[in-house]
Image (cartoon, rainbow, N blue to C red):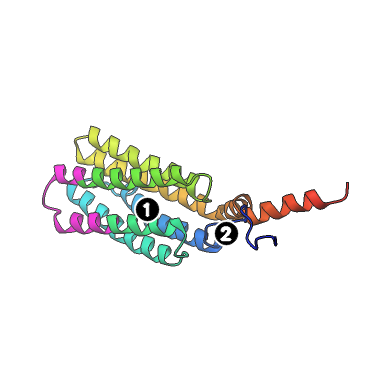
Amino acid sequence: MKDSPVSIDSPQPAPALAAPAALRGALVLRALPLIVVGLVITFTADHSTTFGFVMLGVLGLSSAAVLVLGGLRLPARDALRGLHLGLGALAAVVGALSLALSSFGLGFLLLLVGAYAAFGGIGELVWGIRRRAAHPIARDAIVVGGATALLAVVTALIGDPVSAVGFLGAYAIIAGVFLVIAGLSAGGAAADTAVGTDPARTHGTSDEKEHSPS
């Protein structure tokens, strides 16, 4: 009998990942609103509830814009695209509610910050854990998701506007700086992941070793 044209252990194509430049662009774009809002909060003495609503609204809407813009530049099969589009939708809703309902008081501000941090943080954390061996940004997503979820915990423990706005600003700066660093190092991480998860390359290397003269 003739050999079957398709072997049982034929290598499967690796998942499509964005080019390093696209990954860098997506992460750095996402960092910009965080750093700007964090710096504005840090250098503003007025940490009132109204100011908190404005800063959360600006952060939400600007983050939504850059997340969607960066996400749409990624390949359709790249899992990071779905994460960024989902986070962008959440940020847009929170930002719009924050600006439209800024007269609802401190309790509603804490609710918005807590919901934004909890849903976004846990979602990104789970995304990173599930893809920690298959995506170059997974470990960074675990760190950012964990920090965002921690903001939700902190928000649940405070009850004054100064602390609420202050912690939002601190989180924004820390997360923004980390995303910039992650973006700048995304090229090497993407290359390592592509080599480590490409079955065809691994299969070919093993065949070369088997047929190489001793």
| Predominant SS along the magenta part | helix
- In this rendering, position of residue 141 left or right of residue 1: left
Label 2: few (<14), some or many (≥20) within 10 Å? few
Near-viewer residue (68 or 53)? 68
- Whether residue 199 is visible, yes or no, is yes
In which image quadrant can residue 62 be found?
bottom left
Numbered mark located on residue 198 in the image: none
Give percent across and percent down for residue 102. Answer: 15, 53
Percent of width and height locating residue 176: 42, 50
Numbered disc 1: secondary structure: helix
| Of 188 and 133, the residue lying toward us | 133
Q: Residue at x 29, y 35 (%)?
A: 153
Farthest residue to the left: give it. Answer: 104
Magenta stretch bounds: 91-111
68 shown above or below 213 = below
User: Percent from the top left, x then y, of residue 134?
Assistant: 53, 49
* Residue at horizontal 70 percent and vertical 60 percent from the top: 1
Is disc 2 placed on a helix, strand or loop? Answer: loop
> Cβ–Cβ below 8 Å for labels 2 and 1?
no
In this picture, residue 197 sits left or right of residue 90: right
Q: Amino acid at mark 2?
A: Pro
196 w.r.t. 96: above or below: above
Q: CA distance from mark 2 to mark 1?
A: 36 Å
* Amino acid type indicated by mark 1: Leu
Identify the residue under disc 2: 13
Q: Which mark, by number, is residue 34? A: 1
